[in-house]
Amino acid sequence: MTAPSPQQRLQSLSEEYQKLQTDLQTQITSRQRLESQQQENLAVRKEFNTLSDDSTIYQLIGPVLLKQEKTEAESAVDGRLEFIEKEIKRVEKLVSDMQEQSEGKKMEVSRRDCVLFYHIDHWQVYQLQMKMQEAK
C-alpha cells in the first residue's frame, strides 16, 4: 500500500478539522441549553422564596398536576440545579479540549497546505526547466 499523497493527507486533515468544528458547535449548543435550564430553575427557586411554607405547589408530570410539599419541590429544584451545574462544567471542559484539538488541527492543515504548495511550485519550476532544456 502506498503512502497517501500530500493532497490526500491535506484533504483528510481538512475533513477532520471540519468534523471537530461540527462537534464543537454541538457542544456549544448543549452548553447554551443547559444555561437556559439553569436560569429557569433559578427563577423557580427565587419564586419559592416568595411563598409561605404552607403554600400549595403543584408539579406537572405528563398531563397531570400533582400536589407537592414546598420542601420536596425545593429539594427537587436544588437537585436539578446541582446536576445542571455539573453538566455545564463537564461540557465546558469538553468545549475547551475540543477548541485545543481544533486549533492544533487547524495549524496542521495550514502547515500541510504550505508544504503542498511548496511541492507544487517546485514541480512547476521543474517542468518549466525541462521545457527550457528541450527547447535548446
Image (tube, rainbow, N blue to C red):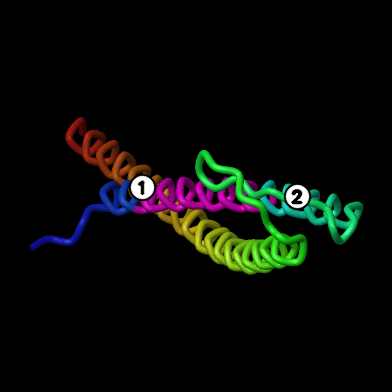
Query: Is 21 rendered above or below residue 78?
Result: above
Asked if the magenta segment contains residue 14, the reply would be yes
Is disc 1 placed on a helix, strand or loop? helix
Magenta stretch secondary structure, dominant = helix
Query: Is 121 rendered above or below residue 112?
Result: above
- 5 or 63, which is in the foreground? 63
Q: Residue at x 68, y 57 (%)?
A: 68
Is disc 2 placed on a helix, strand or loop? helix
Q: Residue at x 21, y 33 (%)?
A: 136
- 72 or 29, which is in the foreground? 72
**Which numbered disc covers residue 55?**
none
The residue type indicated by label 1 comes to Glu
Where does residue 10 sit, x and y in percent of width and height? 34, 50
Q: Report the label total.
A: 2
State left or right for residue 34 relative to residue 136. Answer: right
State the residue position of label 2. 39
Query: Is 27 rendered above or below residue 97?
Result: above
Where does residue 64 sit, x and y in percent of width and height? 55, 42
Q: Dot 2: within a 10 Å radius of its alpha carbon, few (fewer than 14), some, or many (20 or more) residues?
A: few
Where does residue 12 sit, x and y in percent of width and height? 31, 51
Q: CA distance from mark 1 to mark 2?
A: 36 Å
Residue stretch in magenta? 13-35
Where does residue 50 sit, x and y in percent of width and height? 91, 52
Q: Earlier in the sequence, mark 1 or mark 2?
A: 1
Q: Dot 1: within a 10 Å radius of its alpha carbon, few (fewer than 14), some, or many (20 or more) residues?
A: few
State the residue position of label 1. 15
The residue type indicated by label 2 comes to Gln
Asked if the magenta segment contains residue 29, the reply would be yes
Residue 9: quadrant of the picture: bottom left
